[in-house]
Amino acid sequence: MPRLTPFATRGCADHLNAEIASGGGYMGDVGVCIRWLKSTFLWARLAKNPTHYEMPKGVSDDELERRLKALCIAQLRQLADAQMVLVDDDGLSIAPVTHAPAPTAHRTHARTLKSPLCFASDLSSSMTRICTMRPRVHTQLPLGTLMARACIDYETATSLGRLTARCGLREVVQLCADATELQDAATLRRTEVKQLYEVNQAGVVRFPLLEEPAAGSKAAPKRLRIKTSAQKAALLLQLRASGSGLGEFSSCEMPLVLGARRVLRALLEHLTSLGLAKPLRASLLLLRSVECGVGWHDEREAEVPPARSPRA
């Protein structure tokens, strides 16, 4: 049986996870999920124009329901593989994940960090709260709950696990640039390739995009020519954080900032639950710099002269 097209299935896992993670308990089995999908506009579009979704014209309601059931089961299996929902052995009963598996112990953790969303107001005071003390077991926030709370895509939520305890600002910038929320805001056009290459050459970005050197080559790596939306998002994100104007890319600025804010706030909650201090500090720095748009926050702090002692 042919599957529904990706256009119809995009975002289906996000919406199913949001309903299951809400904790209401009404989405407790596959039958309820199918009835819920039939109450959405997806079912109305399928019944109204089935040929748009690569189905024969005049398809029966029973055939539509069979395909919708196959879609629902596939999306739930995908969420279960990512440990966002729990599916019983019978494959019918569903429940949200309330405790993330296998918490780990870390030497550095955020003891007094209560809500990561308040960090953007004052990065300096937030950094003093990240301290070093005896090892402590951290309870990881369930990924499905985090995904529903922050309203991020499934691909973005699963990519948060890429950051380890040794990752810094470069890895955080790359993770944000790879997120769907930023790539949708920074769609690459053919006429922009030259301008983006000049931005990458100008030295105004903190982490320029470089080509991978050949094996055994000792020559310095060359600047990369922009070919994807993720590379464009990485450059524009650093331009915004550095305080440089986006110029002809100013139409992308507000969607870029809003998308980066959603991804970084979700990343802050994820890293806070894990107690990873180094990537947490980098995420706070990037969030503060992107929201202000007047320069990297750590560089501006270094430029502030020390306070003079009052004269006697």
Image: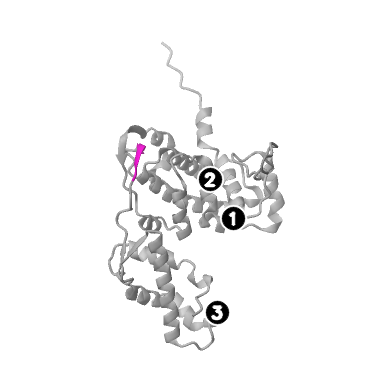
Q: Regarding mark 3 in the picture, which secondary structure is present there? A: loop
Please name the amino acid that badge 3 sits on.
Answer: Glu
The secondary structure that most of the magenta stretch takes on is strand
The residue labelled by disc 2 is: 173
Quarter of the image where one finds residue 72: bottom left
**Vertical position of residue 43 compared to residue 165: above or below:** below
Q: Which residues are magenta?
A: 104-109
The residue labelled by disc 3 is: 54
- Earlier along the polypeptide chain: callout 2 or callout 1? 2
Q: Regarding mark 1 in the picture, which secondary structure is present there? A: loop
Residue at position x 53%, y 37% from top? 296
Q: Position of residue 192 (x, y in %)?
A: 69, 54
Instruction: Decide: few, some or many residues near mark 3? Use Cα within 10 Å; few <14, some 14-19, many ≥20.
Output: few
**Vertical position of residue 209 compared to residue 88: above or below:** above
Please name the amino acid that badge 1 sits on.
Answer: Ala
Residue at position x 39%, y 48% from top? 270
Cα separation between marks 1 and 3:
29 Å
Q: Position of residue 79 (x, y in %)?
A: 40, 63
The dot on residue 88 is none
Q: Position of residue 171 (x, y in %)?
A: 52, 44
> Among all residues in the image, which is located at the extreme left?
25
